Amino acid sequence: MEINRSGGAGKEEICAQAARLGEMLVASAEYRQYLDAKKKLQVNSEQAYILSKLRQQQISLRLAKFLGEDLDEAEDDFENLYATFCLEPVISDFLYAEGRLGRLIDEVQKICGDKLDLWSENEALDHAVKRELN
């Protein structure tokens, strides 16, 4: 391991380890399953188009909700439509594989984040509340 002047790992070593982690992710069962499901989705252009449109609609709904619009009926309609198309094996398999890979990547990110003492809005809010109470 490369040690820099301050006694810690150097940038090159960190990047080399990150590249190794990337290689491990590429070799993982989660990524292989994702690639297989992605290929099947790409071959079925109708299913790929449906999933793309569903995701666009989902983003639009999230944005509208963020802007404070009342979307109860629209959300229900979307969820029913989404549930219907998720019964399609190609879409279902892809979403499952994507979810598994995403959870693995989230775990890796959480592990890295837990090791670092980074500033967060929650921490800043806690300090502000404590200051107000004193």
Image: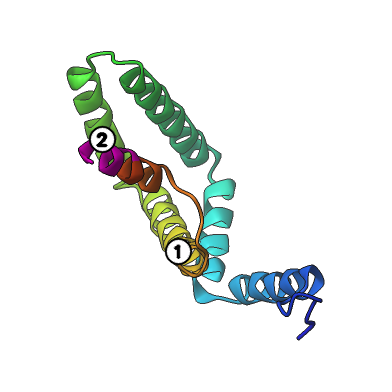
- Please tell me in which quadrant of the rendered image residue 14 appears: bottom right
| Residue that extends furthest to the front in the rendered view of this protein | 134
105 or 45, which is in the foreground? 105
Dividing the image into 4 quarters, which one contains the C terminus? top left
Which one is earlier in the sequence, the residue at label 1 or at label 2? 1
Dividing the image into 4 quarters, which one contains the N terminus? bottom right
Q: Is residue 100 magenta?
A: no
| Rendered residue at 35%/22% (across/down) | 66
Judged left or right of residue 88, residue 35 is right
Judged left or right of residue 61, residue 114 is right
Judged left or right of residue 93, residue 30 is right
For residue 84, the mark is none
| Rendered residue at 52%/62% (across/down) | 34
The percent position of residue 106, horizontal first and vertical second, equals 45, 60
| Rendered residue at 49%/50% (across/down) | 119
Identify residue for label 2.
132
The percent position of residue 64, horizontal first and vertical second, equals 35, 18
The percent position of residue 37, horizontal first and vertical second, equals 50, 58
Q: In terms of secondary structure, what is the magenta stretch mainly?
A: helix
- Considering only vertical position in the picture, is 68 above or below 92? above
For residue 110, the mark is 1
Judged left or right of residue 47, residue 8 is right
- Identify the element where label 1 is drawn: helix
- The residue range painted magenta reads 128-134
- Considering only vertical position in the picture, is 15 above or below 119? below
How crowded pointer 2 is (Cα within 10 Å; few <14, some 14-19, many 20+) is rated as few
| Residue that extends furthest to the bottom in the rendered view of this protein | 1
- Identify the element where label 2 is drawn: helix
